[in-house]
Amino acid sequence: MGFVFSKAMNDSLKGQQEFMRLQLERQLILQNLMRERQAAMQIAWTREFLKYFGTFFGLSAVVLTTGAIKRKNPAVLLPILPLSFIFSYQYDMGYGTLLQRIKG
C-alpha cells in the first residue's frame, strides 16, 4: 500500500517538475521576444528622430557656413562640431552596428 502511494507521489512530482520546466522555457522565450520587440522599437524611434535631427543638422550647417562666410569669422562654425557627433551617434544607432557592438 505504501509503495503504491509512494509511486503515485513520484509520478506526480515528475509531472510537476516537467510542467515547471516547460513554464520556465516559455517564460524565457517570451522575455527574449519582448526584448527583441523593445530593441526594434528603439531602432524605429532612433530612425524617426534621425529624420528630424538630420534636417535640423543640415539646415544648421548651411546657415552657420553662410554666417561664417559673411562675417569672415570661422568661429561661427564651432556649433557644427558637437552637432556632427550627435548626428553620427544617432546614425550609427539607427542604421549602423552600434546595437550589435553593445550586445557584444
Image (cartoon, rainbow, N blue to C red):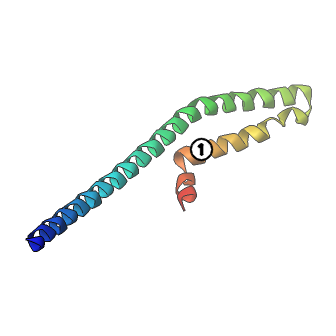
Q: Position of residue 103 (x, y in %)?
A: 53, 58
Farthest residue, direction front: 1
Q: Whole-percent x and y of residue 66? A: 80, 27
Q: Nearer the viewer, residue 103 or 68?
A: 103
State the residue in front, 46 or 104. Answer: 104
Q: Residue at x 90, y 35 (%)?
A: 75
Q: Residue at x 17, y 65 (%)?
A: 9
The residue closer to the viewer here, 72 or 15, is 15
Left or right: residue 58 versus residue 28 is right
In the drawing, does residue 2 fall left or right of residue 55?
left
Who's the residue at 51% across and 35% down the image? 45
Residue 8 higher or lower than 73, as above or below: below
**In which quadrant will I find the N terminus?**
bottom left
From the image, tell me which residue sits under label 1.
Answer: 91
Q: How many marks?
A: 1
Circle 1 residues within 10 Å: few <14, some 14–19, many ≥20? some
Report which quarter residue 2 is drawn in.
Answer: bottom left
Q: Quadrant of residue 73?
A: top right
Tag 1's secondary structure? helix
The quarter in which the C terminus is drawn is bottom right
Three-letter amino acid code of the residue under disc 1: Tyr
Measured as percent of width and height from the top left, residue 44 is found at 48, 38
Side of 71 relative to 52 (left or right): right
**59 or 39, which lies in front?**
39
Residue 15 rendering spot, x and y as whole percentages: 19, 62
